[in-house]
Amino acid sequence: MLLMKRMLAVLFILSLCIACSSDDNGQRNPFLNELSFQYQANLSLPQFDDIRFPGGSVYVAEAGIRGIIIFNLNDTTFLAWEASCPNQTPNACSTMEASGGLATCPCDGYQYSLGTGGAIPDPETGEAGQYPLLNYSARLSGNSVVVSN
């Protein structure tokens, strides 16, 4: 009986490991390459004024594939997203535009929440992008937001 319980526990743990593997199971645009970078946004500089307050966002061209969008969720939590449209091959029109807590892809018009990264269905058609925004690590360090992948 004890051996059977242990075997069931091992099987359960193995199934969790398989379910939580590093494969995104189709939840990531396959055309966006993995990058390694670190970017520091000094909140004392005027170009980052928009992210000094909750709900603010700023586009940074110097990091990521087509840039990054940094979003102030609240005064202590910042989120960073790849600025490439999640459902497009990187191209001339695939850089997201951020405003009012949303990011919009100029190629297909799909919108995404900067608070969650999720696609927002079109109110008329119900259509939404297949992939969510690609998230990067963001943390507040002193008076800077450090974004990395």
Image (cartoon, rainbow, N blue to C red):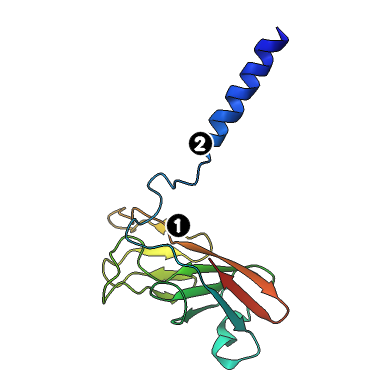
Vertical placement of residue 137 versus 14, above or below: below
Name the N-terminal-most of marks 2 and 1: 2
Name the spot of residue 26 as percent of width and height, x first: 37, 47
Give the labeled residue for mark 2. 19
Q: Nearer the viewer, residue 141 or 132?
A: 141
Vertical placement of residue 120 versus 91, above or below: above
Name the spot of residue 91 as percent of width and height, x first: 26, 72
> Which secondary structure lies at badge 1?
loop
Q: Nearer the viewer, residue 121 or 79?
A: 79
Give the labeled residue for mark 1. 118
Three-letter residue code for mark 2: Ala
> Which secondary structure lies at badge 2?
helix
Query: Which residue of the protein is positioned furthest toward the bottom in this rendering?
Result: 46
Name the spot of residue 37 as percent of width and height, x first: 51, 72
Q: Which mark is residue 16?
A: none
Three-letter residue code for mark 1: Gly
Q: Quadrant of residue 17?
A: top right
Residue 54 visible in the shown view: no
Q: Nearer the viewer, residue 18 or 60?
A: 18
Residue 144 visible in the shown view: yes
**Residue density around tag 2, few if under 14, some if 14–19, many if 20 or more, within 10 Å:** few
Name the spot of residue 76 as percent of width and height, x first: 69, 70
At a point 35% along the width and 66% down the height, the residue shown is: 85
**Residue density around tag 1, few if under 14, some if 14–19, many if 20 or more, within 10 Å:** some
